[in-house]
Amino acid sequence: MQTYRDTFENEDSTPAGAAVPQSKKRWILNAFNMSCAGHMAPGLWKHADDRSARYHDIDNWTEVSKLLERGKFNGMFIADVLGPYDVFGKNFNGALRTGAQFGIDDPLLVISACAAVTKNLAFGVTASVSYEAPYSLARRFSTLDHLTKGRIAFNVVTGFLTSAAKNFGFEQQTEHDERYQRAEEYVTVLYKLWESSWRTDAVVLDRERDLYADPTRVRKINHCGKYYKTEGPNLVEPSPQGSPLIYQAGTSTAGVEFAGKHAEAVFVTGPTPKKVRAHVDNLRAAASKAGRDPQSIKLLVKLLVIVAATDGEAQKKESELRSYASNEGAAVLFGGWLGEDLSVYDEDKDLREVDIPAIKNMVKGYAALYSDEKRPWNRKTFTDHFKLEGLGPTVVGSPTTVADAMQRWVDEADVDGFNLSYALYPGTFVDIVELLVPELQRRGVHWKDYPTRSDGQGIYAREGIYGLGQEKFRDDHPGARYKWEAGCEPPPLD
Amino acid sequence: MQTYRDTFENEDSTPAGAAVPQSKKRWILNAFNMSCAGHMAPGLWKHADDRSARYHDIDNWTEVSKLLERGKFNGMFIADVLGPYDVFGKNFNGALRTGAQFGIDDPLLVISACAAVTKNLAFGVTASVSYEAPYSLARRFSTLDHLTKGRIAFNVVTGFLTSAAKNFGFEQQTEHDERYQRAEEYVTVLYKLWESSWRTDAVVLDRERDLYADPTRVRKINHCGKYYKTEGPNLVEPSPQGSPLIYQAGTSTAGVEFAGKHAEAVFVTGPTPKKVRAHVDNLRAAASKAGRDPQSIKLLVKLLVIVAATDGEAQKKESELRSYASNEGAAVLFGGWLGEDLSVYDEDKDLREVDIPAIKNMVKGYAALYSDEKRPWNRKTFTDHFKLEGLGPTVVGSPTTVADAMQRWVDEADVDGFNLSYALYPGTFVDIVELLVPELQRRGVHWKDYPTRSDGQGIYAREGIYGLGQEKFRDDHPGARYKWEAGCEPPPLD
C-alpha cells in the first residue's frame, strides 16, 4: 500500500487544481469498519463507551447496521488484512499490546446476520486475490449477493503485508507489478464465472416441464491462463447483481491502472483536497484510457468526522478521544502501511532528519501543510497527530462546520462521497447519524430516504452508486462483455 | 466417497451382530441440510409445500434454525461439495434439469444469521481441506466459533468429485490415500493454530496496564511440513471452543483411520442396523487404536423419517412425496457417490447383471435385503427405491413406530444418534418436531430442554455431545496435546 508515500512523492503530478463548480450532487456515504478492535484508532477500546472490542458479538454488528440504515448510508465497508502488522519493532508485539488490527475475524462471515436486519444498506467486504482460488472466491461473493439480495460489494486487494505471505507459505510477497498482473487475470476469471457461465434466466423452476434449470443455458468456462486454471461453471446460480459491485483502493501506477479499468468505486485518502484531487484525476484519466466514462468511477475519500452540537463541544470530544488513542498502536499501523519501522528512531528524533526519503518527505510535507514547521516532528508528535484517524484527514466541529468542510472536499477534490472511519465505536457513527445526517439532508446532498425498487426489494449495491436500474455492470465496464443475458447467445470467452 | 460400495463389498467384516442391551441413553439429533434445492430428494422442489429451492433466502434458514431449536435438536449439519455431479451421462445436464445439488451456495456464509436467532443449536459445516490454505480455513472456523459463541462444528472432507478438482485447476483428484495423508497434516496445522498459537488468556483487555493482549502469550507456529507451510499465529483471538467440534464421514480404510484419530462425531449410513454396526465397530476400533476412548466417537446414522399421526397416514404421505421425486436426479447423485454412470444401461436392464462388480453386488444386496429378489432391479426401480432418501434408510410411520425403529438402530447398530435428512423442506422437520420429538422426550431418549451453562450462554457444540464442561478437546484427542492453557508453558509444536 503506497498511499502515504505517494502522497508526497508524486508532488509534481498535482494538477493546477482549479476547483470544480460547487455541486449539489448526492454524496455517497460509506461507514469504514473492520472486524477488529479500534480499526484506525488503536487504544480507543479502553474508552468506557467504546464497543469495538466486542467485534466477536453478532449484535454489535447488527446494531451498527441498523444505525447506518437509519442514517441512509450507502453501505458499510469492512477492511481486512491477512496477517499481523509486524514492521514496527520487527515483530507483532506492539500490535498485540495495543490491539492494533490484531486479532481480526473473517469479515465475510457476519454479513448474513447484518443483511437479515436491514433492507437497503450495502456491505462492502475486502478480500485478497493473492491466496485463494478464484473459483472459491466467486462462490463466496455470489452466495452473499443472493443472501443480501444484491447488496454486496467486493473490495479487490492484493495485500501489502509480508506477514500475510508467510501465513500462506511464501517467504515474501509476490513482486508488486506481478501481483497486479495476477489480479488482472483473477478478476477476468471471476467475470467469466459470474457473468458468462449461467445465462441470467438459466434457472427456470418449471413444474410443468419438470425442469429446475435449462442445461442449454449453462456452460463451462474452461479458463486456462498464465496463473489460473478452472473449468466452471460457477457453483452458484445467477445472483441479483451478477458480479458484486467492485471496489478498489490501489494508488501505485499498476494499482491506478487496475482501478481505472475494473473499479466501480475507489477509496482514496490524503491530507488535503488538493492532494487527493491529483489522485482522483489520475484515476479518472485511467478510466478514460480504459474506455470508460471517467465519472463512472466513484471516488470515496476517507474521513474521520467528530461532530457535536457546537465546534467547541466537538473539539472537546476530539481531545478526550485522542487521550485514549495509542501512539504505539499508530506507529504499528504506520509501519505496515509505510513499510518502515519507526522504532529504530529515538522517540525525540526529528523525522524530517532521517535517512529514509519516504519518511523524511512525508513528515516534511505534513509539517508544511499544518504550518507547524517549527515544532518537533518526532515519533511522539507525529503519532499524536494521526493516532485517531490513521493518517487520514479529520474534520471536527458542529454539523455546519463539518458539512462545509465536506462540501470543500467534494468541490475541490472532485470526490463523489466519503468513507467515514470511526474513533469511538459506534459513538462516532451515532453522532454522524443523529447530528450530521440531518444537516446533509437539509442541504440536499444526502438521501432523505433510499430510492424504492419496483419489486419492493431493497436497492442493490450497484444501484446505490449509479441509480435505480443499474443492477449489473455498466456497458463500458470490462466485465460487461461477458454478460450472458436472457434470450441471447453466449458471448465469446476470449 | 465409498460408503455405498463398501456396504456390500465388505460383507465379510460384518460382526456376529449380537445386539447391545437396550439403552436409554440420550440420543444426538442433527438435521441434515445443504445449501441447495432438494438435497437428498431431488425433484421435491416441485411440491407446493416445499421451500428448499428458496435456499438463497436468509429467512428460509433462520426459520428452520428456530424450528430445530424448538425441537431441541443438537445441531443443523450442512453438507457441501465443490463441483457439480457429472458422472451420470458424463455431464452435469441431469444435475441442472433436476436441480440435484446444483447450484450450491457457500454453507459458511449463512451461519451468523442463524446463530443470531438461536441460542443452543449447533451448526456443523462441511469444508474441504483439499483446495484452501489451512490458515484461511482456521480463521473462518475461529470466527464462526466466536460469532456463534461456541456452537460451530467442522465436517472435515477431502472431496470425492473430479469436477471439483477441475474447478481448482487439477486434471483429477489427488489419489485417495494421499488425500488423507495431506488431510492428516492439514488438521495438525489447524490444531497448532487453534490450540497453540494464542494462550487461552492471551487477550487481557487490561485498561490499567493499557494492554489489549499479552505478547508473551502469543507465538508463531512456524509449521513447515511435507504439504503445508505457515508461520502463524492464528489471525483470530482464542475462541470459545478453541477448535470447532470435529465431524467426519470417511468409510474407506484411510477414512476410518482418520476418523478414528480425529473425529468427535462421525456420520454413518447403511441399509440396516446390522450393516451399519460393522462400520461402527470399525470406527470404534480405530479410535481405540489411536489411544482414544472408543465411546468418545459419537456415531450418527443418516435416516429419513416420514412421521404422521398414524402408520397409514405416514405411508400415504410417503407415497405422495415420492411421486414428486426425480429418478434422473437420484441417478445423478448415485453417479457422484458410486463413481459409476448408470446412464450407460437401458432403463430396463437388470442391474444385477451388469459387468461392474460395485453396482452388481450393491443391487444384489439390496434385493436380498428387501426380500424382493424376483422383481426387476433396473435403473427405474432402483432409483424409485431411493430417490427420496439418497440410498439411506427410511422409517415411515406413527411416532411410536418411528421411535421403536430408531431404538433398534441405537441398540443394534450401537449408534449415538441420528442425522435426519428431509424429503419435504421444511415439512419433514416440522413433522419431526411436532410429532416425533414429544414421543422421544416421553421415552427419555431426547432432551426436554438443553442443559444450562452457568454463564447463561447457550451450550457449546462440544458440550452438546459430551456434556456440560467439555468445552475443548477431550484429553485423549490428538489435538489436546497442543492446548496452551492459561498459566501454562507453551506445549511443544512437534
Image (tube, coloured by chain):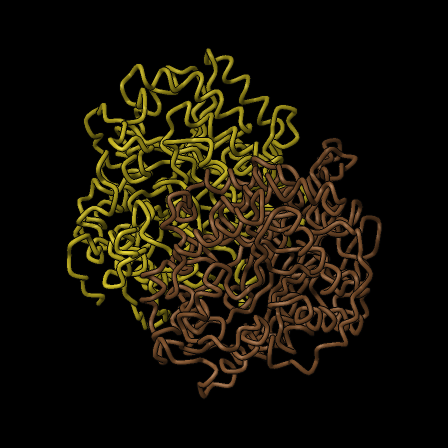
Chain colours: A brown, B yellow
Quarter in which the C terminus of chain B is drawn: bottom left
Q: Is residue B27 left or right of residue B48?
A: left
Along the viewing direction, whichever of A271 and B263 lies nearer the viewer: A271
- Which residue lies at the image location 63% right of the left edge and 53% below the top edge? A153
Along the viewing direction, whichever of B329 and A485 lies nearer the viewer: A485
Residue B200, x across and y down, in percent = 25, 52
Along the viewing direction, whichever of B469 and B407 lies nearer the viewer: B469
Residue B156, x across and y down, in percent = 38, 52
- Examine the rendering and report whether any part of residue B345 can be seen: no
Residue B240, x across and y down, in percent = 31, 45
Q: Is residue B277 left or right of residue B485?
A: right
Residue A44, x across and y down, in percent = 41, 53
Q: Is residue A280 left or right of residue A65?
A: right
- Which residue lies at the image location 71% right of the left edge and 65% below the top edge? A413
User: How many numbered marks appear?
Assistant: 0
- Which residue lies at the image location 48% right of the left edge and 26% below the top edge? B429
Along the viewing direction, whichever of A183 and B182 lies nearer the viewer: A183
Name the image quarter holding residue B420.
top left
Q: Classify B386 as above or below B315.
A: below
Q: Is residue A185 left or right of residue B142?
A: right
- Examine the rendering and report whether any part of residue B190 can be seen: yes
